[in-house]
Image (cartoon, grey):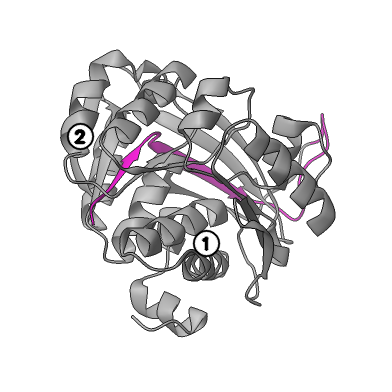
Amino acid sequence: MTIVVFGSINMDLVVRTPRLPAPGETLTGHSFFTAPGGKGANQAVACARLDAPTRMVGRVGDDLFGEQLRHSLRSFGVQDDGVLTTPGPSGVALIAVDDAAENTIVIVPGANGAVGSEDMPRLERALDGARALLLQLETPLATVAAAARAGRARGATVILDPAPALPLPDELYALADILTPNESEATTLTGIPVHDEQSAAAAARALRARGARTVIIKLGARGALAADANGVRFWPAFTVTAVDTVAAGDAFNGGLAVALSEGRPFEEAIRWGLAAGALSVTKHGAQPSMPDRAELLALSGVRG
């Protein structure tokens, strides 16, 4: 039941602020810390923390951050032999988190921008026997599409997180077994303002019409809505006290992928995703906030 993650590996530079600054405004923050992140690496850690054998394929720079990022992956149990060290800086994300747990994020790709066709052989080796392939959009789009083709060719379930949102080629929709945008990403992709269940359902149907087999729209504190060949369904979120929403979507994708890789029913996999996302917002940071299996099972009420 191996899961492969192909995508970004960043160092997060995080500042806590009373509120998010307006354009041109200077604020005094509460605190600053660094934490390993990147949507790809976050999702890999989310899977590994839930006891799934997980392989990461991507790139880090030959700077100090690069070695720290590798060490973090290994410390959480992620296999990093598919990670290439490339000359230059590692990717970084500049993150502001306010007292309401909302955030803004600016990404500088660094080594993630160098991911290309040379990385495909490592991905193909990693996909040997894999149940699922997790993808995001923090590496070059052409490479994401090539990775999706490789995953599909090897029978892995291709789960695409279209973040950060940008126009996608029709081929990539068709290659996605599961597409998992949040509200803002679904709005960007479809032009439909997503703000409630009804608008989310409309956006999900529009994305399915483009070729995605299943669309799950992550609705934050409200829950998640899924559309597939069986229709549209909604699941409410678990109630928790949020302190930091960074990487909640990555936790959701990890929980979803692990449940599906274990052969669990789709409805149960959604609950795993929601439980993982809910638990992640109760802790600070990206990778450090990913829940372990015992925590997830306790919240979700699902047997291990």
In this rendering, does residue 86 appear at all? Answer: no
- 17 drawn magenta: yes
What amino acid does circle 1 point to? Answer: His
Report the front residue among 213 and 122: 213
Q: Amino acid at mark 2?
A: Gly
Of residues 1 and 60, the one nearer the viewer is 1
Q: Which residue is mark 1?
A: 284
Residue 191 is marked as none
Q: Position of residue 144 (x, y in %)?
A: 42, 26
The reply, left or right, for residue 52 in relation to residue 209 is left
Residues under numbered marks 2 and 1 in contact, where contact means CB atoms less than 8 Å apart:
no
The local secondary structure at tag 1 comes to loop
Is 298 displayed left or right of 94 in the figure? left
Q: Residue at x 32, y 64 (%)?
A: 49
Residue ranking furthest to the front: 230
In the rendered image, the quadrant that contains the N terminus is bottom left
* Quadrant of the image occupied by residue 257: bottom left
Q: Which residue is mark 2?
A: 82
Q: Residues within 10 Å of mark 1 (few under 14, many from 20)?
A: many
Task: Tell me which segment is drawn in magenta.
Answer: 1-25
Mark 2 or mark 1, whichever is nearer to me: 2
Residue 120, placed above or below residue 192: above
* Left or right of residue 214: residue 91: left
* Res 118 → quadrant: top left
Q: Is residue 232 visible?
A: yes
| For marks 2 and 1 on the same chain, the one whose residue lies earlier in the sequence | 2
Measuring from the top left, give residue 155's x and y in whole percent. 29, 40
Rounded to the nearest angstrom, the CA distance separating label 2 from label 1 is 28 Å
Vertical relation: 225 (above or below) 192? below
